[in-house]
Amino acid sequence: YASFMSEQACAACQGTRLCSQARGVTIGGKTITAVTALSIGEAYAWTVALSSGDEDGPAGAGVLGSEELQIAGEVLKEIRERLRFMLNVGLHYLTLDRPAPSLSGGEGQRIRLASQLGCGLVGVLYILDEPSIGLHARDNRALIDTLLRLRDMGNTVLVVEHDADMMRSADWLIDLGPGAGILGGEVMASATPADVARDPHSLTGRYLSGELSVAPRGADARRRPDGRWLRVVGARMHNLKDVTASIPLGVMTCVTGVSGSGKSSLISQTLYPALARAYHHAEATPGPHQAIEGIDYCDNIINITQDPIGRTPRSNPATYVKLFDEIRQLFASTPEARARGYKPDRFSFNVKGGRCESCQGHGQKRIEMHFLADVWITCKECNGSRFNKETLTVSYKGKTIADVLDLDVREALTFFANVPRMERMLQTLYDVGLDYIKLGQSATTLSGGEAQRIKLAKELSHPATGRTIYILDEPTTGLHFADIDRLLDVLHRLVDAGNTVIVVEHNLDVIRSADWLLDLGPEGGQKGGYLIAEGSPEDVAEIAESATGQCLAAHFSDSELVSAAS
């Protein structure tokens, strides 16, 4: 019923959820609602100003007098300490009243990490899954220092991570491989980072040592703007300060900046909805802006998000990329299927006829737990195959339809090597680094990064028009160095076909590989929302005011910057 409902602020409290008496109390001229509307960085500065005017100043030199500080001193100290913990994990841009459901997974994880720092516990095993997701390279060092502090307090910290700086800062590395899926699951190396970097059997170690690297594009290989520009004029969404940004068409542009600087507000919430309305008559409402110029140069916009490709066990990679349609057609064309009069829909688990009716083609049965999450168990009638016995008597090259759905992409490429159309679809999945996923793998088991790459593979399988704009928000989430290399190859193939690729990203290897950069900042929240730098990666690396530029300068060699300048 969401489409028939709308929200509006309460007229009595203006959305603050507090009565007039609570809203009337002030400290240092601010009500509690004004304080919770501050970002974490602003709130920290406010607490410092209350007690001492500046962080190193004497107590009593701030807004509060000595008598008031006697009452509030300990409370202020506790508040300031908790705010400092959140600053140390890169959350300076979040406002204190930010709704929890609006936080990303990485932000929620770092908030929980900050709360643990304040507990002072020892002898605890902390497990973190990719805490650096969504974090700018500048803020990553502070996160690493926080984890080391947890360790030094007498705890054990176990981190699942792909970030090179995090790996190099660890005391011990465990590298799994050698590949993914059935080709993985082995311990390739277990040693200090220095020893892993010397281990020839560890793919991760070879990247850490510099033997392998994510293929950089030198200044000579970068595509130059050809005079066609897409221009966002006067963007004012969230913290954007009347930003005018020019995006060259026919190249790969990376939108960068510290967390909360306005990247998604500019691209995902302003540019994309505006172009979706222009090209597809979508109902999406773009953020406030004056105009979008250069729309006529293109005719299609595709936002490849990390949203799930489906929310039930019925959805899988094969159905999403339309490969399952080809598989069903192939099985229906076999002599045995034709003799029995089976049509392609006989081999679908979504309709009656060929599916197992006991589980209605799910392969699993749902047990409702009422106040707990539902539980799914394997169907005893079909043993999870989804199809009835009659359907499973039909085979192609010795495999049933259930056997084919159980193949991973690598195996399927070999199996369908003589079917050009299917081979082309499978090749796109392979090219985006998904060679290990099974064709019939439930969509509910796929990560956001895997879902995004499946969508990218689907687009790659379509004929190229050369007039499409692709938008991707942090596509390297959860990817190893080798996977990033393959992803970049795919993105550059899209651009070589005449399309435009816009990537919102923190990964320095991707940023360095782009043709053009738009860097927002200088900070997050209200201190962000400005266009700080634009140009080639080498140009941005020379701009001292750009946090991304400073990180890029450290990433480039001096010879590369000199070569680009000349």
Image: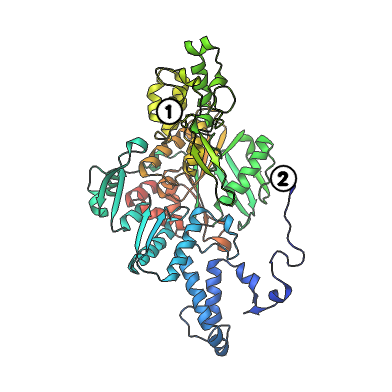
Image: 212 above or below 7: above
For residue 3, the mark is 2
Numbered disc 2: secondary structure: helix
Image: 385 above or below 293: above
Q: Residue at horizontal 64%, vertical 54%?
A: 237
Q: Which numbered mark, 1 or 2, is in the foreground of this view? A: 2
Q: Position of residue 93 (x, y in %)?
A: 54, 62
Q: Position of residue 525 (x, y in %)?
A: 56, 61
Tell me which amino acid carries mark 1: Gln
Numbered disc 1: secondary structure: helix
Along the line of sight, the residue nearer the viewer: 524 or 187: 187
Which label's residue is closer to the chain start, 1 or 2?
2
For residue 225, the mark is none
Q: Residues within 10 Å of mark 2 (few under 14, many from 20)?
A: few
- Return the residue at label 1: 427
Q: Position of residue 206 (x, y in %)?
A: 27, 45
Along the line of sight, the residue nearer the viewer: 416 or 238: 416
Left or right of residue 123, residue 94 in this image: right
Outermost residue to the front: 380
Q: Alpha carbon of mark 1 to alpha carbon of mark 2: how far? A: 39 Å
Q: Residue at horizontal 64%, vertical 43%?
A: 273
Q: Residue at horizontal 36%, vertical 46%?
A: 563
Q: Mark 2 and mark 1 in contact (Cβ < 8 Å)? A: no
Image: 30 above or below 528: below
Along the line of sight, the residue nearer the viewer: 395 or 545: 395
Quarter placement of the N terminus: top right
Tell me which amino acid carries mark 2: Ser
Image: 121 above or below 198: below
Quarter occupied by residue 488: top left
**Residue 88 in view, yes or no:** yes
Q: Residues within 10 Å of mark 1 (few under 14, many from 20)?
A: many
